[in-house]
Amino acid sequence: MSSLPFKFKEFSVNQDQCAMKIGTDGVLLGAWTSVELNPFSVLDIGAGTGVLSLMIAQRSYAENIEALEIDADAYEQCSENFENSPWADRLFCYHASLLEFVEEIDDKFDIIICNPPFYSENYKTENTSRDLARFNDAMPFEHLIFAVANLLSKDGLFSVVIPVKEERKFIELASKSGLFPNRILHVKGNPDSEIKRSLLEFSFTESTTKTSQLVIETERHQYTEDYINLTKDFYLKM
């Protein structure tokens, strides 16, 4: 199944060379991230398939959308997905580590978006690429926040999806770099399940944080109106 392209309404994504396949976290983040300020430049950190960049390209008029991917196979596939999309002239992928990128790039970005690796458990699998994508020793939160603090434009927005159990720690780390939460979305699978994910939006402006909640399903494959409204521009069957 994963060797087949993942088809969205306006683009398709090949993912057979990527350790981390397209999932709900990424699609929610790509749909939820605000483009109301009409961003000119966007940075997708740890791009994987490139799905976040492609979603922002569909949703905005941003002229410069750059993606960063350290894994060689994922980088090749991300670049290919960009070339095959309707927005190829606005999309570019770099093959580099996050800290290399920060050192070499002087540009500032109006939106920075990231679906980071966040499995910090102590085990590893035999699949190095999958480990790199899944374990946060490949991109510690400290490195991510350091990069964002250096690369985000003065009025820019940074959005990220993390496990809810990491939310307080992440917000504390961000505040030390002058980044403050504007919006938080707590995501739960169904009305009776625990909150599993936090979608966080940060800026350099300290303000009252708007917190809301999204339930994905009422029962198996019975999606809530909120979830449908958020993702209907992308998923074929919504």
Image (cartoon, rainbow, N blue to C red):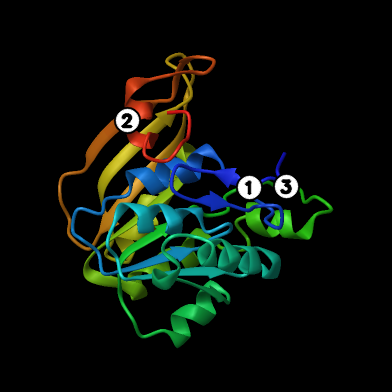
* Mark closest to the chain's N terminus, 2 or 3: 3
Decide: marks 3, 1 in contact (CB < 8 A)? no
Which residue is denoted by mark 1 in the rendering?
A: 5
Q: Which of these two is toward me, 60 or 190?
A: 60
Q: Are marks 2 and 1 in contact (CB under 8 Å)?
A: no
Give x and y (percent) for residue 121. Answer: 67, 46
Q: Secondary structure at mark 1?
A: loop
Which numbered dot is residue 3? 3
**In the picture, which quadrant includes the C terminus?**
top left
Q: Which mark is residue 116?
A: none
Could you tell me which secondary element the residue under label 2 belongs to? helix
Q: Does 163 appear above or below 191?
A: below
Tag 2 residue: 229
State which quadrant residue 202 falls in.
Answer: bottom left
- Distance of label 3 from label 1 (alpha carbons): 7 Å
Q: Amino acid at mark 2?
A: Asn
Using residue 208 as the reference point, say whether residue 180 is left or right of it. right
Q: Amino acid at mark 3?
A: Ser
Residue 236 seen by the camera: yes
Please indicate whether residue 220 sits to the left or right of residue 186 in the image: right
Q: How many marks?
A: 3
- Position of the N terminus, as image quadrant, is top right
Density class for disc 1 (Cα within 10 Å; few <14, some 14-19, many ≥20) is some
| Classed neighbour count for the residue bearing mark 2: other residues with Cα under 10 Å, few (<14), some (14–19), many (≥20) | few
Residue 29, image x and y in percent? 41, 46
136 to 2, vertically: above or below: below
Distance CA(mark 2)–CA(mark 3): 28 Å
Separation of marks 2 and 1 at Cα, in angstroms = 24 Å
User: Quick check: marks 2 and 3 in contact, CB under 8 Å?
Assistant: no
Left or right: 218, with 39 as reference point: right
Which mark sits nearer the N-terminus, 2 or 1?
1
Q: Is residue 132 above or below residue 189?
A: below
